[in-house]
Image (tube, rainbow, N blue to C red):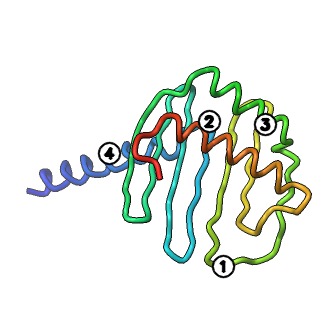
Amino acid sequence: MKRIIGILFALIVLVSCNSQKVYSDFDISYSKSGGYAPVYENLLIKDNSAHYSFEGEGKKIKQDFKVSDEDLKKLNTVLSQNNFRRIQEDHKKLYDNVTTSINIKKGPNEGSKTDASLVMPNFKTNWANIINAFHEIINNNVKNTK
């Protein structure tokens, strides 16, 4: 009996660990979360494979899709043109704010930025342009978007 319970436990652990792999193995990530009525949105890209999830506003969407080389090149161009690595975050404390975080794990734009405490005023346009590039990928590839 102990052996069966041990095997079931091991199986459950393996399945749960494997299901979370998509959230840790990525090259590019865009996530938006928080607010008074919480919203959770994630776009994770590894090579040309993307995983999108959205939960909030009474909707729950999960979808995998392929991102074209052209879209990835365009995204990297937008990141470079808008000086992603140089965007400065403000350090004010904000609560119940919808926060957007972007993580780039490889390439010339490698870095991590968030607007959790807002973005310094002289970088707001750059940040908006980068967010719009992610929204374009989402809107062009995900069915039932907001």
Question: Which of the two discs, 4 and 1, sits closer to the camera?
Answer: 1
- Mark 1 vs mark 2: give the one in front: 1
- Residue 57, quarter of picture: bottom left
Q: Is residue 113 above or below residue 47?
A: below
The one of 98 and 108 positioned closer to us in this rendering: 98
In the rendered image, which residue does mark 2 sit on? 27
Percent x, y for residue 119? 81, 61
Residue carrying label 1? 95
Query: Under tag 3, what secondary structure?
Result: loop
- Sequence order check: which comes first, mark 2 or mark 4? 4
What whole-number distance in Å separates the C-alpha atoms at marks 1 and 2?
Answer: 29 Å
Q: Amino acid at mark 1?
A: Tyr
Mark 1 or mark 2, earlier in chain: 2
Give the image location of residue 76, x and y in percent: 73, 31
Figure disc tally:
4
Viewer-nearest residue: 27 or 53: 53
Residue 71 falls in image quadrant: top right
User: Which callout, 2 or 3, points at the residue further toward the start of the chain?
Assistant: 2
Identify the residue at image location x=66%, y=79%.
Answer: 95
Number of the label disc, if any, that sits on residue 109: 3
The residue singled out by tag 4 in the image is 14
Q: Which of the 4 image quarters holds residue 115?
A: bottom right
Kindly identify the amino acid type of the residue bearing the numbered disc 4. Answer: Leu
The amino acid beneath tag 3 is Asn
Contact check, label 4 and label 1, Cβ < 8 Å = no
Task: Determine the residue positioned at 88% across, 62% down.
Answer: 121
